[in-house]
Amino acid sequence: MRFLRSKNPSLRSDEDIINDFRKSGDQALIGVLFDRYSHLVYAVSYNYLKDEEDCKDAVLHIFENLGKDLNRYEIKNFSSWLHVVTKNYSLRQLSKRKETLPITNQSYLVEEEESGPEFNIHLPNLSKAMEQLNEEQKICIDLFYIKEQSYKEITEQTGFDLNQVKSYIQNGKRNLKLILLNKK
């Protein structure tokens, strides 16, 4: 969408823009980030919402709240963080609509070596299924898939060793699949 692209993006780094915003509160700096990333927010939200107007609303909502979020969170990689924020916003919108998403054997919830028919999972069921995991699995699944952190980041944040993190994620995926398939 042409209206989302700027002809003259700032040459400053995202970190510099964010740091300056935190110091000054200058909304024009949010505008620079909008010019730089609004088309990406639109594209990510379109992957989930499949509706142009809903995607435009997503872009506006995310950038309206960006000032508060920049002051609230420590952000190391802005574009990755923004991608996760957009994905989570889109999934919340789908959940509000009570829509289902197809989960195929390429999904992170299904073991790669398995084959079988596609099945649909109602998004609220995923939240309920997550609640049934043990605390370690729930934490690792959330950090790895939802917050898109690396194994190393998860080990640093939780104090689990690398093998524990891998095990919690693998067992958590398997348990989620079993829980969700039993709800059919």
Image (cartoon, rainbow, N blue to C red):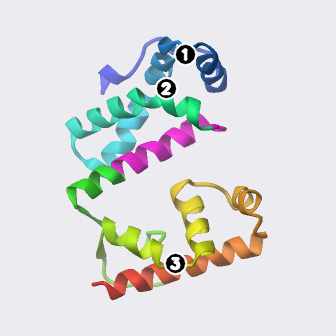
Task: Out of 104 and 100, give the one closest to the viewer.
Answer: 100
> Pointer 2: what residue?
67
Give the residue at mark 1: 25
Magenta segment? 74-90
Task: Quickly name the residue at label 3.
Answer: 133
Q: Position of residue 58 (x, y in %)?
A: 32, 37
Q: Residues within 10 Å of mark 1 (few under 14, many from 20)?
A: some
In the image, residue 78 lies in the stretch drawn in magenta: yes
- Give the secondary structure at mark 2: helix
Q: Is residue 58 above or below residue 30?
A: below
Whether residue 123 appears in magenta in the rendering, the answer is no
Q: Earlier in the sequence, mark 2 or mark 1?
A: 1
Q: Amino acid at mark 1?
A: Gly
Q: Where is residue 39 drawn, in percent x and y?
A: 39, 30
Q: Tell which of 17 and 52 is nearer to you.
A: 17
Task: Residue type at mark 2: give it.
Answer: Gly
Judge from the rendering whether residue 9 lies leftward or rightward of residue 5; answer left or right: right
Asked if labels 1 and 2 touch by Cβ distance under 8 angstroms, the answer is yes
The residue positioned 23% from the left and 61% from the top of the image is 99
